[in-house]
Image: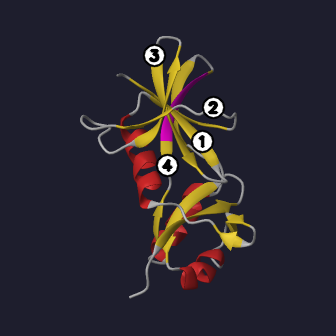
Amino acid sequence: MEKTNWYAVFTASRAEKRVQERLEQAGIENYLPIREVKFARDGLVKRLEVPVITGCIFVRVSETNLSSVLSIFGVIALLKREQEPVVISDQQLDSLRILNEHAESLEAVNTGYPVGTTVSVMQGELAGVRGELIEVAGGHQIVIRIPYLIECAAKVKV
């Protein structure tokens, strides 16, 4: 059996959930990090599920099966570096998944946080998360970097 890895693929604008459905129908393991956001419109508070990383979904396939992912309608491109697909480690994706499920807030950021102390959470809801600890105005944030793609900052209680 061929080794599978996680890869990031870019989707058509606002098509992440439809692409996820198509990937699932094709039997391709995937992960679309989604957060619920609240906004006020016409005096009502509405809730909407939005992707953490706009236009991106993660897939787990072997390198030889990447072409089948690219043939899915709505998939635009694969994250590459120097013409080679960027492999996203299980640890990075697991950390992103745990933070997305348990952090007070999670946002994709494009500004470079200063390099901080590398931390591993040993217990609690965030056990297993590895990232950089950033102190922010008396609180703390953990930053998970997915090389060549994005940084995700999560606000956590310490």
Viewer-side label of 1, 2: 2
Q: Residue furthest bottom?
A: 1
| Distance between the alpha carbons at the discs numbered 4 and 1 | 13 Å
Are the residues flagged by discs 1 and 2 in contact, CB closer than 8 Å?
yes
Which range of residues does the magenta coloring cover? 35-40
The residue indicated by pointer 3 is 139
Residue type at mark 2: give it: Tyr
The structure residue drawn at horizontal position 72% and vertical position 54%, both measured from the top left corner, is 13
Real-space Cα separation, disc 2 to disc 3, in angstroms: 15 Å
Q: Amino acid at mark 3?
A: Gly
Q: Is residue 24 magenta?
A: no
> Which mark lies nearer to you, 4 or 2?
2
Task: Report helix, strand or loop for mark 4.
Answer: loop
State the mark number for residue 113: 2
* Upstream in sequence: badge 4 or badge 2: 4
**Are the two marked residues, 3 and 4, in contact with CB atoms closer than 8 angstroms?**
no
Q: Residue at x 59, y 16 (%)?
A: 43
In this rendering, the label closer to the viewer, 4 or 1: 1
State whether residue 82 is above or below residue 16. below
What residue type is disc 1 on? Glu
Mark 4, residue position: 33
Q: How far is disc 3 from disc 4 in space, using C-alphas?
A: 24 Å
Crowding near the residue tagged with mark 4, few <14, some 14–19, many ≥20 C-alpha atoms within 10 Å: many
Q: Position of residue 122 (x, y in %)?
A: 27, 38
Question: Of tags 2 and 3, which is closer to the observer?
Answer: 2
Of helix, strand and loop, which one carries label 2? Answer: loop
- Nearest to the observer: residue 51 or residue 120: 120
